[in-house]
Image (cartoon, helix red, strand yellow):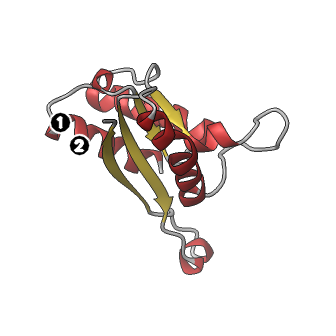
């Protein structure tokens, strides 16, 4: 999912003629620890910018890496929805955050794809959320 997220983030930055620093946070759905590192590499390669200062990932926020055996997180749609509704919208409403780029990620899983040992296609949708 990291390549899909990187492509979406790069497209938003280009289309809006902005930089990652224009956002308080860039939030991905659930790339987990491994996917987040891959995302940062892709963005640096494609855009020449380091998003480490503004990037966070819902899966990394929900799971405890050292207490739970979690390497890549859980469900992208579950982690995204949980964190957006419980944390990020609240932070925007209470002016703790001003502007975030929220990038929901997901794998387009198919039993046939897995059985044929093909790569799993992924998708990423983005929305810019701004507080009042």
Please provide percent x and percent y for residue 17.
14, 31
Numbered disc 1: secondary structure:
helix
Q: Which residue occupies the foreground of this view, 3 or 117?
A: 3
List the residue tagged with mark 2: 11
Q: Quadrant of residue 19?
A: top left
Q: How would you rate the neighbour count of disc 2 (Cα within 10 Å): few for under 14, some for 14-19, many for 20 or more? A: some
Q: Nearer the viewer, residue 83 or 51?
A: 83
Horizontally, residue 22 falls left or right of residue 2, namely left
Local crowd size for mark 1, using a 10 Å CA cut-off: few (<14), some (14–19), many (≥20) = few
At 59% from the left and 72% from the top, the residue drawn is 114
Do the residues bearing badges 2 and 1 touch, measured as CB atoms within 8 Å? yes
User: Looking at the image, how many numbered discs can be counted on the residues?
Assistant: 2
Q: Helix, strand, or loop for circle 2?
A: helix
Q: Residue at x 57, y 75 (%)?
A: 116
Which residue is at a point 62% across and 44% down the rendered structure image? 59
Q: Which residue is mark 1?
A: 14
Indicate the position of residue 69 as horizontal and vertical percent values.
81, 44
Determine the image quadrant of residue 77.
bottom right
In the displayed structure image, the side of residue 66 where residue 22 appears, left or right: left
On screen, 74 above or below 96? Answer: below
Quadrant placement of the C terminus? top left
Looking at the image, residue 33 lies above or below residue 80: above
What is the spatial separation of the Cα atoms under label 2 and label 1, in whole angstroms? Answer: 5 Å
Q: Which mark is residue 86?
A: none
Residue at the right extreme of this rendering = 67
Query: Quick one: 4 or 94, which is closer to the camera?
Result: 94
């Amino acid at each position: 999912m990291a390549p899909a997220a990187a492509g979406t983030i790069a497209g938003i930055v280009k289309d809006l003629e902005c930089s990652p620093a224009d956002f308080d946070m860039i939030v991905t759905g659930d790339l987990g620890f491994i996917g987040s590192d891959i995302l940062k590499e892709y963005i640096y390669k494609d855009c020449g910018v380091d998003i480490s200062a503004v990037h966070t990932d819902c899966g990394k926020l929900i799971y405890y890496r050292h207490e739970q055996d979690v390497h890549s997180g859980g469900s992208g749609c579950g982690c995204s929805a949980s964190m957006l509704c419980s944390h990020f919208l609240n932070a925007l409403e209470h002016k703790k955050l001003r502007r975030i780029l929220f990038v929901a990620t997901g794998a387009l899983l198919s039993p046939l794809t897995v059985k044929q040992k093909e790569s799993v296609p992924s998708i990423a949708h983005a929305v810019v959320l701004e507080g009042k």
